Amino acid sequence: MRILAVSLDLDDTLWPIEPAILAAERHLDDWLKRHHAAVAEAWPIAALRDLREQVSAERPDLSHDFTTQRLLTLERAFAACGIGNEHVDAAFEVYYAARNRVDCYPDALPALAALSARLPLVSISNGNADLERIGLRQHFRHSISARELGVAKPAAAIFHEACARLGVAPENVLHVGDDPLLDVIGAHAAGLHTAWLNRHAATWAERVAQYPAHADATPDLEIRDLGELARWIEDQGKTK
Ligand SMILES: [Mg+2]
């Protein structure tokens, strides 16, 4: 294995996403209570969450685009209260600003600094994190999102786009992520090497059993945290 570049998933790889989403929902709810009390009353957090799921189910064409799903959700919530679209962008901004106030895992920042000093990094995410806002953009040569590309992981096209932007062949790229299907199975099928980030001491056999069609897929590398990845890349450099 000759690794010349690393592609990284974002949500649940560099930071846990659930606390950020829950906080974003609370911030939006507080803002609605202050500025649009009728909307807040009609759409408490759980109801707005259900509405978003409904939008997502009705619009499979937007499965790669969480931002547009959420904008449509807000449009519908306001419309149900007889209000037009004029406050949707402001409401989204409240949500989106909080969604990007993530707390990185303690190993993430040192690992990003070490990795980016050695190899070009690219982010590949199905989510709508903004690395610029989060303050991590400087570590990445490129940043690829499903929303921008119109296609999401595990499709090979998003991994191949990352390789093309890096100018590195898939077999020389290591993709790193937490999700067995989206990250490991997807990247492996696209011809990349893979590292499964297993922060919760799961077993690969258990996780991959959910995807019987890919039962023989195995990550090239299994790591507990990103420090382990940085050490592995460093050792690779020594044996070159
Ligand atoms: Mg992830």
Image (cartoon, rainbow, N blue to C red):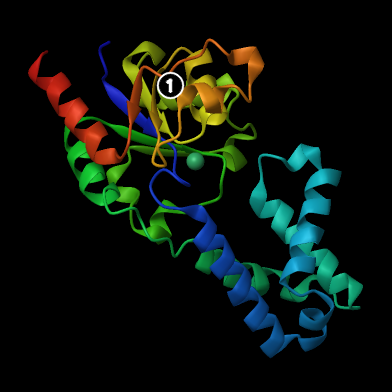
Residue 224 visible in the shown view: yes
**Left or right of 14 in this view: 26:** right
Which residue sits at x=81%, y=82%? 41
Q: Is mark 1 within 8 Å of ligand 1?
A: no
Residue 92: image x %, image y %?
Answer: 64, 67
Q: Secondary structure at mark 1?
A: helix
Dot 1, crowdedness within 10 Å: few (<14), some or many (≥20)?
A: few
Seen at 89% across and 78% down, the residue is 81
Image: 142 above or below 156: below
Query: Residue 126 falls in which quadrant of the image?
Result: top right
The location of residue 183, given as percent across then percent down, is 50, 29
Q: Position of residue 48 (x, y in %)?
A: 76, 66
Residue 55 horizontal/vertical position (percent): 81, 52
Q: Which residue is mark 1?
A: 164
Residue located 58% across and 30% down the image? 153
Q: Quadrant where the N terminus lies?
A: top left
Quadrant of the image occupied by residue 210? top right
Instruction: Work out whether 122 lies above or below 37.
Output: above
The number of numbered badges drawn on the structure is 1
Is residue 142 or residue 213 the one in the foreground?
213
Tell me what residue is drawn at x 26 percent, y 32 percent: 229
Q: Nearer the viewer, residue 199 or 230?
A: 199
